[in-house]
Image (cartoon, helix red, strand yellow):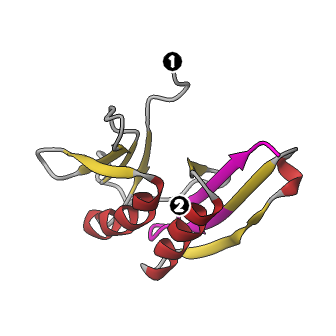
Amino acid sequence: MNIFSHVTLGTNNLDRAVEFYDAVLSPLGLVKDSITDNNETVGWSWAVPQSWPSFFVVLPIDEQPASVGNGTMVAFSAESSEVVDAAYQAGLKLGGQSEGEPGQRAQYGPGIYYGAYLRDLDGNKLHIVYRASE
């Protein structure tokens, strides 16, 4: 069993967020597969094997503006350092802001830990990481 059911981030512009996350998550192998009837929630999951959506962006249910949490971050796994680079570049191309260029992060323990950090269009911090044994 996975430790997480899913991750949800708020947005103030769902159309813009969907375009951003389609570009960032596509290199990681996630596909958009869930849109609620009221068009207020969009979800992505792994294409193979098909599974319950793992990541959502939503218009907040309380109708208050979405805002970011200090110290909050969502990390996505990548299959290679090249995939980290592709996802990071896709995010920057659509207006995301760099929070740490792609590179080896030796401080996170033994083996290969290659990651990049960026902020989405609503300011949420994202981490894209490739891990491998040496």
SS assignment at label 2: loop
Task: Tell me the tag on residue 124.
Answer: 2
In the rendered structure, the answer to whether residue 54 lies left or right of residue 37 reads right
Task: Tell me the tag on residue 1.
Answer: 1
Q: Residue furthest top?
A: 1
Q: Which is nearer the eye, 4 or 11? A: 4
Q: Residue at x 31, y 68 (%)?
A: 19
Q: Residue at x 87, y 45 (%)?
A: 109
Please state the horizontal and vertical placement of residue 78, each as a whole percent of the image.
57, 52
Circle 2 packing at 10 Å, graded few (<14), some (14-19), many (20+), is: many
Q: Residue furthest left?
A: 37
> Is residue 42 at all visible to an observer of this figure?
no
Corner quadrant of residue 99: bottom right
> Is residue 72 at all visible to an observer of this figure?
yes
Please state the horizontal and vertical placement of residue 74, each as a whole percent of the image.
56, 50
Q: Which is nearer the eye, 120 or 31? A: 31
Q: Which residues are magenta?
A: 116-134
Relative to 109, say whether 119 is above or below: below
Name the kind of residue labelled 2 in the image.
Asn
Q: Residue at x 31, y 63 (%)?
A: 18
